[in-house]
Every structure is written in C-alpha cells, then in structure tokens.
Image (cartoon, coloured by chain):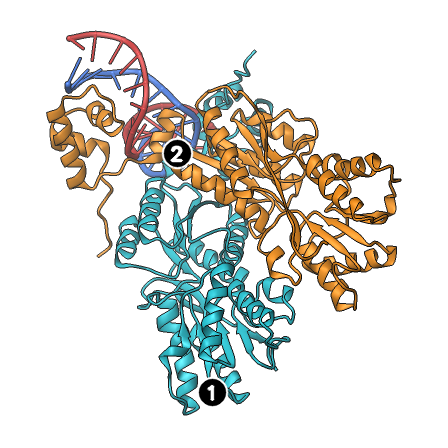
Chain colours: A orange, B cyan, C blue, D red
Amino acid sequence: MVDQKKNATIYDVAEKVGVSLATVSRVVNGNNNVRASTREKVLQAIDDLGYQPNAVARGLASKKTTTIGVVMPDVTNVFYSELARGVDDVAQMYQYDALLTNTDDDQNRAVTAIKNLSTKQVDGIIYMGTKLSSQVLKAIEATNVPVVLAGSVAADEQLPSVNIDYVAAFEAVTTKLINHGHQKIALVLGSEDRAIDQSFRLVGYQQALAKAGLDYDKNLVFAKARTYATGQNQAAELVAQGVTAAVVYDDEVAVSILNYYQDHGYKVPEDLEIITSNNTNFSIVSRPELSSINQPKYDIGAVAMRLLTKLMNGEKLEESQIHLPYTLIKRGSTR
Amino acid sequence: MVDQKKNATIYDVAEKVGVSLATVSRVVNGNNNVRASTREKVLQAIDDLGYQPNAVARGLASKKTTTIGVVMPDVTNVFYSELARGVDDVAQMYQYDALLTNTDDDQNRAVTAIKNLSTKQVDGIIYMGTKLSSQVLKAIEATNVPVVLAGSVAADEQLPSVNIDYVAAFEAVTTKLINHGHQKIALVLGSEDRAIDQSFRLVGYQQALAKAGLDYDKNLVFAKARTYATGQNQAAELVAQGVTAAVVYDDEVAVSILNYYQDHGYKVPEDLEIITSNNTNFSIVSRPELSSINQPKYDIGAVAMRLLTKLMNGEKLEESQIHLPYTLIKRGSTR
DNA sequence: GTGAAAGCGCTAACAT
DNA sequence: ATGTTAGCGCTTTCAC
C-alpha cells in the first residue's frame, strides 16, 4: 500500500481542462493572455488535482531557480545567525529560498561551497565571512551570478557589500576610552590576517590613538581568542600587559574577559573598562552588562538580501557599498 | 564586455572528445563501464572546458536533487542553530545541501515551508519545532519524502525522531532538587500547549513529585517566557510564589531569572537553586554558572541527518525513535 | 486568447 | 565499452 499518487503535472491539468500546456503555464505564471473563463477552469483543475508546479523543471526551463546561496562561517555564532535571519526573512518575502553552507571561515570550504552553489544554479549568493582570499574572489567571479557581502569587508571594495563603518565605530569607542583617561587600551581582535580586523577595526583604533596624540603599542593588540574558552587565556594576557581598558570585537570573548577579571578579584569598570561590538544577548547577560557598539545585524542581512534581489533582477545599484548606522550603547562595563 | 562565456554542457564535452553524451555522463557519475583511456580524455576535456554538471538538469532527469530541507523555528536561537550545524555537517559529508526555512514555530508557516520544499523536490526534510499540528503532519505526509524530527517530539511518535529522553531528564533534575529539601520547586516552560512542554517536561516533573510523595501545584508551573526580556517578568512571578528552586526549559530564560534574583538582592544558590536545560554558552557566562541538563545538541542534528540519509536511500530504520544520552552538569547555581 | 513545438541539460534504459 | 533515444516537467517563441 505504498502511496503511489504521482504528482500531477502541468500536462495532467491541461488534459483535464482540455487546453494546452501553454495555457496552463500562463495561468500558473499569472500571464494575462488567458480568457477569464478558461482561467477559472484551469484553476479549478489545479485545485482538484492538487497540482504543484515542479520547481526543478521550471528552473531548467527558465534558468531561474528562485533559490539563493548563503555562505557563512557558522550558524552557531549569534552574530552570523542574526544576519542570516535578516537574509532569510527578506528572501522569503521575495519568494526565494536559501541554501545555507557553513565554512568555518575556511577559504577552501568557501570556494567549494560557491562552486557547489553555482552547480545548483542559484540565482545569487550572500557571502559572510571575515576573509576573502583571492581564490574565493575568483570563485565568486566564476559563478556569473550576483554576490553581495554581508557583514564582511573586502579590503578593496569591489563587490557590493553592507556593513557598518567599522573604522568609525572602533575609532569612536577607542576615543571614548581615551577620554576616560586611559593610556593602555587593549584592542582584542579575532585574527591577524583578516581584512575586517586589520584594515578596519585596527585602523579605527589607531586613528583614535593618533588623534589623541597617543603612541600605538603593538603589544596592546591581541588576536588569539574566538570563543568563550580561549577568551580566558586572552584575558590573562591583558592582565599581564596591565591594560586598564579594552575594546573587544566579539561578545562571547568580551564576556569571557569580563568574567576573568572579576573572577580574579578585579573590579569592572573600576579596574577595567570594556566595550564589546556586537550587542548580542551576551552583552546583557553579564554583570555588569557590557557597553557595546550596536550593529544592526538583522538589518545588515536584510539589506544585503534586498540588494541581491535588485541585482538578480538586472537592476543597477545606485550605491553598492552600504554602511548602515551603528550606535553606542553605554552599560555598566564602562564609566 | 559582459562575461558571456556560457557554461559548457555535457554535450560540449562529448563533442570535444568525440564521444557520446552517455559516455561523458558515465565518467561524471563514476560508472565503470568506460575504457580508462577514454575516461582520461573526457576528464581532460572537462577540465579544459571547465565543465560543471548542471544540478538542476540532473535533478529533473534523475528525480534526485541532493538537497534537503530544514524547517526550524529560528536560526537565531542557539539551541536550534546547533542542531542545524549538526545537520549541515553530516549533510555536507553526504553531499547534500540544506535549504533552510525559519518558521518562528508558526504552524502555518511550517505548512507553507513544507509545501514549498516539496515543490523544490527536496529529497528529504529535517523538521525542528516544539509543535506539530495536524495540518503540519498532513503537509508532511503529502510530500512523499522522508522526514525526520530533530529535537522535536510528536506526542504520538509516528515519525522518526531524535531527541533526549525529556521525561527522564526533567524527572532527574526535579528529583535532585527535591533531595535538596525543596518543597516549592518551579517548573518554567515555554508554552502551555506544546507537546514537548506538556507531554514530556511537565510529565517528568510530575513523576518526580509523585515518587517523592509531593503534591503537584499548578501554580508552580510557569510558561510565559521565551526570551531574556520576558524572563524578567517571569522571574518576578517566581519570586511572588516564593519558590526556592526552579527547573527552566531554556538557557536565556534561566539566565534572566538568575540575574533577576541576584539583581533584587537574593542569593543563588542559597535563596534559589536553579537548573537549566540546554547547556549553551549562556549557562557558563552567568555568575554563578548554571547547572544544566546537557543535551547533545549537535549530535541530535547529526544523527537526525544520518537517519534521513538512510531513509532517502530507501533503507529501513531498525530504530526510529532515538534517544541520545543526556548528562547533568553541576555548577554554581545549585548546591 | 490559445496551441504547437522546440528546447533547458541531464539520466537511464536499451541497443550494439 | 559506447552510442541512441526517450523522456524528466516546464517555459517560451512563434504561429494562428
């Protein structure tokens, strides 16, 4: 008793109504060149037969799959999952589905993912990540489909992207700390080779220092932690360097550092002022709560997807490097 | 100067080598019925032309898309995103791609998502969620593709699923609290109508009470919080009821309650012992850290996907209701 | 307004 | 070992 009810095809519908495939296709696709009365009949038959167009066949014939690819480091990271949520919501709004791939920010996996998506004939790709190697760039070009970067920055802004102005944001928070009288301000980054860290966050930090007439000290820049666990070791290094303030690129790492200090008898913000950058729930869970740069994560994803829909429609972008506004949220971890 | 390099087709390759489509198809698909020498030539041509099989055409011809659908409440929720990561990792391992849809646990959206996935001819579906209405069940049946539930429970176990034994886990933690001498133990759930809450968590809680000879008090069961923010209000109710211990279904809500108590001058675990259930990073970020049921979230997703691959291969499952082991992690929020 | 027919790029018998 | 030939289910000219 296997359920063998084969899916009805457009042909079945056409036959039942006594019209041609073309007519059925027209009503399915909302083409107006169909007499109202026959449209009715077709619709009725579609309903009777439970006909659902086969998207694969459609994709083959029309060369549009109404599917996009999302290449991201890790769904498990709240920062990225919020971007993804923004992407998915507007994708659904425009009737696109999203094929999601985790790369752990590994460039080889990203290349594989992009090629694979290309194979599946996605109509466009949203790329998230902190790196963008030349191989990835090459893979992107090879796809021939529009790609927009979300929450990622290519050092050489050639691809459409949506972000906040990381340079300005990091300069702003660093300046705030400088104004509080700090001399040894740590900058905690995620890597020593990613554009977002080196060409943006670090630059903002350095600009603040320069404008205040402070020397840049390489020893105050850290880049060893990406998780709560490794944040503990990173924190120990900050203590060793005797920093009195810190700007941190990631919330989990920031909470880790905050906890480390307090667990070791230091007071926050008295002994350490700390500012984080993603304003995820981690920043309100800690005690004291963490001051943070507030990036419109969801919106970054949403706007990126919106751009992509335009690109997929063949529209030109008036503006392809979009900076969404960020804000600074003051909480207990700073004075 | 538009990049008009049309993608090479299998036909181009065949022509270049001077063989038929079929031969090319064979080497692409690893069919052994090809002389080594011609295989070489074909491979060479594929390389020269940069030929990549069109997965859509393939899907249409073979009726297999090597794509699965993942229907989940919200990627942004760490519990689900970890499940999704497990799913995606084994999916990649088996060369499947995942089409992801957020439903916010809305049954109508779930139905729409399932129908849509069906339209896209996915080979299988992983469903996550706390509810499973009859409409959703109906939509699932209608797809004719295998579906496995991950981290979800249908009250009437008819679909393959992988979970932990929620009843046992909740009974265990409740018993622990009872053994600490508590009389008023709160149970904080996410809903008053979901199977996972009512038919599993609540049942485990009640069993513990019953075995200890304690009366069940409906006023100690709460179900109003799903976020950190709403957790604050929920916490106020716990205080009002004068509970001295609590079992909480979600980490963010648990942290919220923990913080509320401490922010209002109560001591944890002295005035409130609290145990949470997902052991996400939220449980180690708080001070004190939260004792927790430890669910193998990633594994639940991974195993569910593994089951699905079997089902998609037409294999029978020896066991379709899988309970992965859980553990109890003791931290500072309990004595 | 509607139909006929040619593909889209591939797989899968079936021949040879 | 290799080729031929139908489709897969749909869109899309081009006629009428």
Q: Position of residue B179 (x, y in %)?
A: 53, 88
| Residue annotated with mark 1 | B183
Is B39 in front, or is A114? A114
Three-letter amino acid code at disc 1? Answer: Gln
* B80 with respect to B196 (left or right): right
Q: Position of residue A25 (x, y in %)?
A: 24, 26
Image quarter (top left, top right, bottom left or bottom right) of the N terminus of chain B: top right
Q: Residues within 10 Å of mark 1 (few under 14, many from 20)?
A: some
* B118 with respect to B290 (left or right): left
The chain carrying label 1 is: B
Image quarter (top left, top right, bottom left or bottom right) of the C terminus of chain B: bottom right
Both labels 2 and 1 in a single chain:
no
Q: Position of residue B250 (x, y in %)?
A: 49, 65
* B269 with respect to A27 (left or right): right
Q: Is residue A226 above or below residue B330?
A: above
The Cα atoms of the two marked residues, 2 and 1, are separated by: 53 Å
Q: Is residue A118 above or below residue B143?
A: above
| Residue annotated with mark 2 | A94
Q: Residue at x 46, y 25 (%)?
A: A310
